[in-house]
Amino acid sequence: MASKSSKSSKISKPSETPKDAHKVEDLTTIRGVHEYLLHQELVPPKLRKSAITRLTGGVANFIYHIELPEPFYRKAKDGEKFATYTAILKFSAHFVAFMPSLPIDIGRWDYEKLALQELKGFMTQDVYNDKFELVEANPEDVSLAIFVRTPQVYYTDDVKKVIYMEDVGPRAVTLKELLRRPDLHKYMTLEMAMAIGKTLAHFMFRFHEWGKGTNENNVKRIDQFSNESARKFCLWRTFGRLLESCEKYMTSSDPESNQRKSLKQIQETMTETLMNDNTTVIMGDFWPGNVLIDLHSYESRPNLQDFVPGMISIYIIDWEFIHPGNPCTDLAQMSAEFHCSERFAQTAEGLVRVKTLGESFLIEYNRLGGSWETGAMMIQEGAHVVTWVDKAGWSNDKLKVETVAREGLRRMERGWEKMQAAKNQV
């Protein structure tokens, strides 16, 4: 992993909430959002409060779905016209939406706005034939088209920290929700799972390559997105809590045990390494919950073997934690989530589809030239699993959760051994 300038490896919680934070608290309520939308003339005057729903998917921010009574036409600030039946309003506060006691740097909003602006038009389009082989965009050959992109932004408010953006559609669900469905096999064949994994890999590989370059003003993108507070927060949420997360899964309670000393070394080494890694720009929060997928014509039907040509749209959302880093961080987070989806799959049919999608994603990324089979990535995969598996509502089966957490711990330790062995060979 690249390591240039030396920075502090200490992980701490973000700074305290500013005293004037109460000025924007109206947008934490549906009533306040309704008043704001009318005042900004973003919706028709007859919009009712009942047409606004707060979404549960947002953890750090307040996210609302707006159902308009009629298509609404408006010219955006950048001059483009938009017309929509539905929209999403995202409000960022000085604290975590679902944990108000935890402050978080509001500067993340500016980086998300910048990311969505810079990635406008950045899209991966893959087309497959009826054998699910990648082909050229020839209408005679195409049986499936998969698009991956970011949502279109309609309006931003630099003062209130609001982004008003495209709603990806009423049929869209997060990839995490989709992979958790007991009837996943009715929505997704093995071939489709493989194709989706490949296309996600194509998007992320292109994004990571993009992050190594410069913008139109010849500014390095790692400098343009020097979101250090996001880097620190991302490290704190996993490695900052590593020892306390591993506590109940260690083989010994002895504070001087070799295992505890090893975990302390892992925590310190990975923190120092990742704080100083500027290989490229990374998304920073790449997991199935931030991947929205609309299967379009692939709605539930009795026999998916009766192939119907169609389109799958995928949107990557929540870019507020974009920052300089190593691609393995994005890959490890997604891979760890795929592992948990696999281990907690409710059916054998669902398990094999999750496994296929996850393996396809990593294999294709590697084929494109991106390296991921490293000790550092194994450590990050294991750390994510052991830190989050008992907090993300995967299962009420405590024994199963503990088993998966121990798997994460073992993977982290094997990654550390691999990392040390590689170091000794140099």
Image (cartoon, grey):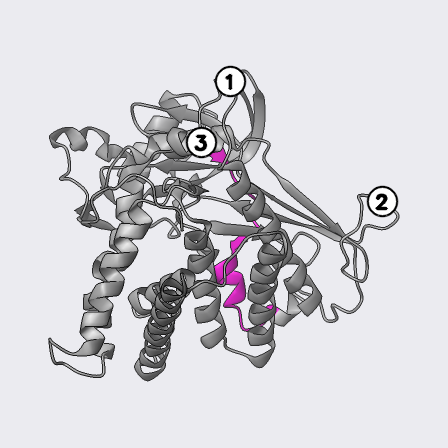
Reading the image, the residue beneath label 3 is 221
Badge 2: residue crowd in 10 Å (few <14, some 14–19, many ≥20):
few
Q: Are marks 3 and 1 in contact (CB under 8 Å)?
A: no
Left or right? Give the position of 28 relative to 23.
right
Whole-percent x and y of residue 368? 62, 52
Whole-percent x and y of residue 348? 57, 80
Mark 1 belongs to which amino acid?
Asp
Q: Label 2 to label 3, Cα distance in Å? A: 36 Å
Q: Of the numbered discs in the image, which one, if any, rests on residue 139?
A: 2
Closer to the chain start, of discs 2 and 3, is 2
Q: Secondary structure at mark 1?
A: loop
Residue 254: in magenta span? no
Left or right? Give the position of 294 relative to 33.
right
Q: From the viewer's perspective, is the residue at label 2 or at label 3 nearer?
A: 3
Residue 170: in magenta span? yes
Q: Is residue 340 above or below residue 91?
A: below
* Residue 122 visible in the snapshot: yes
Q: Label 3 to label 1, Cα distance in Å? A: 22 Å
Left or right? Give the position of 11 relative to 64.
left
Mark 3 belongs to which amino acid?
Arg
Mark 2 belongs to which amino acid?
Pro
Q: Secondary structure at mark 2?
A: loop
Query: Closer to the camera, 114 or 28?
Result: 114
* Residue 79 found in image quarter: top right
Q: Label 2 to label 1, Cα distance in Å? A: 34 Å
Report the span colored magenta.
Answer: 163-184
Residue at 56% across, 69% down:
354
Residue at 57% across, 25% down:
82
Badge 1: residue crowd in 10 Å (few <14, some 14–19, many ≥20):
few
Q: Is residue 340 above or below residue 235?
A: below
